[in-house]
Amino acid sequence: MLAPGATIGILGGGQLGRMTAQAAARLGFTTHIFSSEPECPGAQVTPLVTVAALDDVDALARFAQSVDVATYETENVPVSALEAILPHTPVRPGVEVLRVAQDRLREKDYLRSIDVATAQYREVTGPDALGRAIRDLGHRAVLKTVRMGYDGKGQVMITPDVNPAQAWAAIAGAADSAGIAILESFVDYRCEISVVVVRGTNGTIVNYPAVENQHANHMLDTTIVPARIAPELAMRAEAIARHIAEKLDVVGVLAVEMFVTHDDEILVNELAPRPHNSGHWTMDACYTSQFEQLVRAITGLPLGSTERHSDAVMKNLIGNDIDRWREIVAEPMSKLHLYGKVHARPGRKMGHVTRLLPRHE
Ligand SMILES: Nc1ncnc2c1ncn2[C@@H]1O[C@H](COP(=O)(O)OP(=O)(O)O)[C@@H](O)[C@H]1O
Ligand SMILES: [Mg+2]
């Protein structure tokens, strides 16, 4: 167990790294953020920053030597970066879950191998293969890059009037250097939900309730807490998320995104081995936030309660939404979080607001 005063290394300095550093500071830990961007949200709230590229092995080794444990705020960290760190300090969650979560094909293969249902999918390696996969899976599908996608980036909707060559060209620039993509059947879901699970070094596992996620342009817009689904379905979703965290031996936080179909099937969409946007509400509506849980899990402290004292609706502030901060900050039951980003580009997550409601059940 690490004691307060120890240093936690965080790969990545976006809003997730920032909010992790804030939670760590509250428990008396120091944080050291490794980021390729000097003006990242995380750098504003941590005493130690290394600005270097994720393939700078010397910088990674020095960073690793200066911390007592390391974690990452995004699954888009190359495994090689973890390998440069591992001789010097433990990384939690580990390499295995990162490998699975950063590759959509490997992720779906893995989920199927542990009996978790997903949408139908095919590997595609070019426009001809895409044409065949569309004939196989049907004309309502989503083409995605295998790696480096987030917030709907690197995705194209396939509809009957879309030509495979054009669809391929649309993601080819962003596609994996190996030119591999995945075609997934379009899931005509009733709703999207997610479950955030936390697992400690001794295998203790806890989860937050299933929440409902509404997306706009394939990007999270609103999270409703709890999900408006039958208790039996919520329990099933929570069991699936715990099963995956256990199989992957996660120490830290794992978010599991799922679709609920019209016939009450649950299909897992993707995994994130880190705090998740759909868990931001826990900062204001729970006794222990997902960020504090990550800090507790990776330092070996006992996990906190995942109990919520309030229901909540979390809304992302994307691009110019941030201009409404004056109104939002004046709402008495709303908690405004801003990430310190200077430029409000369209599609950029600038902050979020959690609106608290009395807990219903
Ligand atoms: N197969 C699919 N069927 C229906 N909607 C999908 C499908 N794949 C993705 N989406 C929509 O796009 C969103 C983002 O896709 P996702 O695979 O989660 O990628 P990202 O890494 O960008 O979050 C999903 O939450 C969902 O709303
Ligand atoms: Mg997603």
Image (spheres, grey):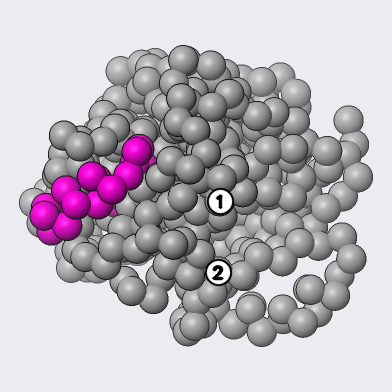
214 vs 281, nearest the viewer = 281
Does the magenta segment cover residue 75?
Answer: yes
Q: Nearer the viewer, residue 27 or 106?
A: 27
Measure the alpha-carbon separation of dots 2 and 1: 17 Å
Residue position marked by numbered label 2 in the rendering: 339
186 to 167, vertically: above or below: above
Q: Is residue 110 left or right of residue 217?
A: left
Residue 322 higher or lower than 138, as above or below = below
Q: Position of residue 339 (x, y in %)?
A: 55, 69
Residue 110 magenta: no
- The stretch in magenta equals 55-79
Lower position in the chain sequence, tag 2 or tag 1: 1
Q: Position of residue 357 (x, y in %)?
A: 87, 50
- Residue at left offset 31%, top offset 58%: 34
Q: Amino acid at mark 2?
A: Tyr
Tell me the amino acid under the disc marked 1. Answer: Ala
Q: Which residue is mark 1?
A: 25
**Local SS, label 2:** loop
Residue at image coords 35%, 22%: 248
| Mark 1 residue crowding within 10 angstroms, few (<14) / some (14–19) / many (20+) | many
Which residue is the extreme one toward the front? 5
Q: Quadrant of residue 154?
A: bottom left
Residue furthest to the left in view is 178
The residue shown at (87%, 60%) is 333
Relative to 318, 112 lies left or right: left
Local secondary structure at mark 1 = helix
| Crowding at mark 2 (Cα within 10 Å: few <14, some 14-19, many 20+) | some
Q: Looking at the picture, does residue 129 appear above or below residue 196? A: below
